[in-house]
Amino acid sequence: MKEDCLFCKIAAHKEESKILYEDDEVMVIMDAYPDTDGHTLVIPKKHFEDIYSIDPDLLLKIIDTGKKYATKLMTTLDKNALTFVVNYGDAQVIKHFHLHLLPDFMHKTHELSSEEIYNKIMKD
């Protein structure tokens, strides 16, 4: 754990987040500042600064987890598209590797509150 990393704190349950899923290696959380309804992040619990430092097996697990939640988000939110994004360098606001899941990103809808989306996803 990196002490000054927000995602490390979330992974250690020292900071609050809307957690959709977690196991020993990864977490799926709702983005605190969503670009679109259902904007979700898949993060490793162990700190890796970027895509170049992450273990390939863990990267594959993050992508597989993202695929599962992409389907769940699209079905639950009745969306026909989803964008996977990994930022790097200056575009990476939090320097802890994470995969963005952005339902219907081209339209950037904001029709539901984060709480409503969280409850819909957790209900299914």
Image (cartoon, grey):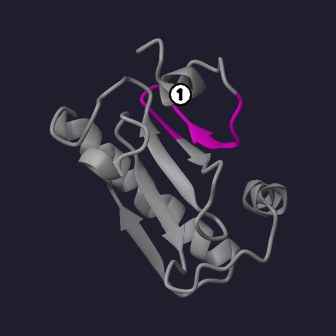
Q: Locate residue 78: give its quadrant.
A: bottom right
Count of labels in the image = 1
- Residue 5 placement (x, y as % from top left): 47, 23
x and y percent of residue 121 in the render?
A: 72, 60
Determine which residue is flagged by label 1. 6
Q: Is residue 59 magenta?
A: no
The answer to whether residue 109 is left or right of residue 11 is right
Q: Report x, y in % for residue 92.
A: 35, 47
Q: Most extreme residue toward the front, as rendered?
A: 90
- Neighbourhood count class around disc 1 (C-alpha, 10 Å): few under 14, some 14–19, many 20 upward: some
Residue 59: quadrant of the picture: top left
The residue sitting at 36% across, 34% down in the picture is 95
Examine the structure image and report whether residue 22 is included in the region drawn in magenta.
yes
Report the residue at 48% width, 17% height from top.
4
Residue drawn at x 50%, y 30% is 7
From the viewer's side, name the closer residue of 69 and 112: 112
The quadrant of the image that shows the C terminus is: bottom right
On screen, residue 92 versus residue 43, left or right, reads: left
Q: Residue at x 54, y 25 (%)?
A: 11
Task: Indicate the secondary structure of the residue bearing disc 1.
Answer: helix
| Camera-side residue of 91 and 58 | 91
Left or right, 95 with reference to 37: left
Where is residue 81? Give x, y as percent.
49, 83
Kind of residue indicated by mark 1: Leu
Instruction: Find the magenta span and give its range.
Output: 16-27
Quick check: 89 left or right of 96? Answer: left
When the figure is inspected, residue 90 is found, relative to residue 15, above or below; the finding is below
Tell me: residue 86, above or below residue 73. above
Q: Quadrant of the N terminus?
A: top left
Between residue 38 and residue 6, name the one nearer to us: 6
